[in-house]
Amino acid sequence: MERRDVQGHYERLAAEYDEHWVYGPHHITWMSARIAETLRLSSADRIADIGCGTGMFAREVARIVNPEHAILCVDPSVAMLGQIGTPPPAGLTPIVASAEDIAAGRSQLPYGQLDAIWLKESVHHVADPAATLYGLAARLAPGGRLLVIMLPTSIEYPLFQAALDHFAELQPDPALIVGHLREAGLQTHLRHVEYELRLDREKYVGMVRARYMSMLSTFTDSEIEKGIDEMRAAHPEPVLAFPDCFAFLLGVKPEEGR
Ligand SMILES: C[S@@+](CC[C@H](N)C(=O)[O-])C[C@H]1O[C@@H](n2cnc3c(N)ncnc32)[C@H](O)[C@@H]1O
C-alpha cells in the first residue's frame, strides 16, 4: 500500500468524479431531497455545503429550494470546485477553503451567520473533527442546523476484502461525531437511511480501478487488479445490487433564551 494523499487524490479524480459517483440520476435527486428535508431548508436560509466536491448535490438542492442567497459551495480542492462550472450556475457560490478554514474564521464568508450547513462524506477528511465541528457550530445562527452525512464504519459494498478492512480502519464512528456535535452545544439526532444501488458490474469495476473512494488511493495498481479478480470471482452476476447506507447526523442550535 502507498501513502494517503487526499488532496492529490481529488485533483486527479475531479474530471471524472461525477461519472463515478453518479450511481444514477435518481441517487442525486433522492439524496438532495433527503438533505433538504432533514435540514428543513427554506428559500430564505443562508446555506453552506462544506466539502461540496463538484457541487452535484448543492446544484440539485438549489433546484429544490430556490434559495434567495446563493448556496456556499466550500471545498479545498480547486479541481473539484472547478467542475461546478465557470461562471457557476445561479444559486451556487464556490469558495476554495477547508472545513477547518471556515471553522477557524480564516476564510471570509459572504454571510455573517449560516442557517444550515451540511458536510456530505467529507468529515472523514477533517483532522480534528471535534474542534472543527465546534467552530462550524459557532457560525450557525440561533435555530441553525448542521447535518453530517457519512458512511457507517462497515459497508456492504461488493469490494475486495482488503478494501473493506481498510475502510473500516479509516472511517470514523458516527457515534463519535454525534458526540462532537453535542459538545458543540447542538441538540443531536442520528438516523440511518438506505438506498438500494444496482450497477453494471463492469461499471463498478471501472470505478474501483479509478479509485472512486479515497481509501482506494493507497492500493497499488497490482493490489487493485488482484482485488478486482477477487470481486469478479465473488460476484459473477452482471448487475451488482447492494445497499448504500448513510448515517444522517443532525445538530440543531437552540434558539436564543432556551
Ligand atoms: C468523497 S468527496 C465528497 C464530495 C461531495 N460532498 C459529494 O458527496 O459528492 C470528499 C470531498 O471532501 C473534500 N475535502 C478534503 N479535505 C477536506 C477538508 N479538510 N475540509 C473540507 N473538505 C475537504 C475533498 O476535496 C472532496 O471534494
Image: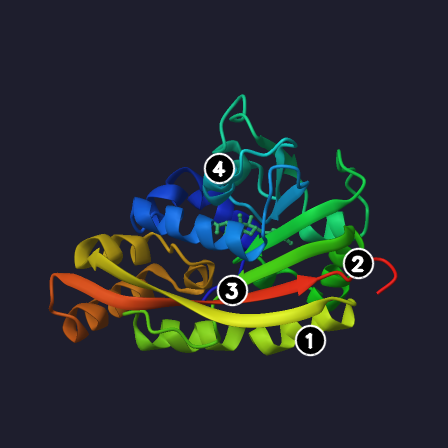
Question: Does residue 134 sit above or below 57 in this rendering?
Answer: below
Q: For the residue marked with disc 3, what is the amino acid? A: Met
Image point (81%, 44%), residue name? 106
Q: Residue furthest front?
A: 257
Residue beneath disc 1: 179
> Dividing the picture into quarters, in which one does residue 241 lie?
bottom left
Instruction: Mark 2 vs mark 3: give the one in front.
Output: 2
Q: Report, in whole angstroms, how far the alpha carbon at label 2 lies from the one at label 1.
A: 20 Å
Left or right, residue 80 beside residue 254: left
Residue beneath disc 2: 255
Q: Report, in whole angstroms, how far the alpha carbon at label 3 lies from the one at label 1.
A: 15 Å
Work out whether residue 171 can be spotted.
Answer: no
Q: For the residue marked with disc 4, what is the amino acid? A: Arg
Q: For the residue marked with disc 1, what is the amino acid? A: Gly
Residue beneath disc 3: 150
| x and y, in percent, of residue 192 in the image | 47, 71
Note whether ligand 1 is within 8 Å of mark 4: no
Q: Are marks 3 and 4 in contact (CB under 8 Å)?
A: no
The residue tagged with tag 2: helix, strand or loop?
Answer: loop
Image point (76%, 37%), residue name? 111
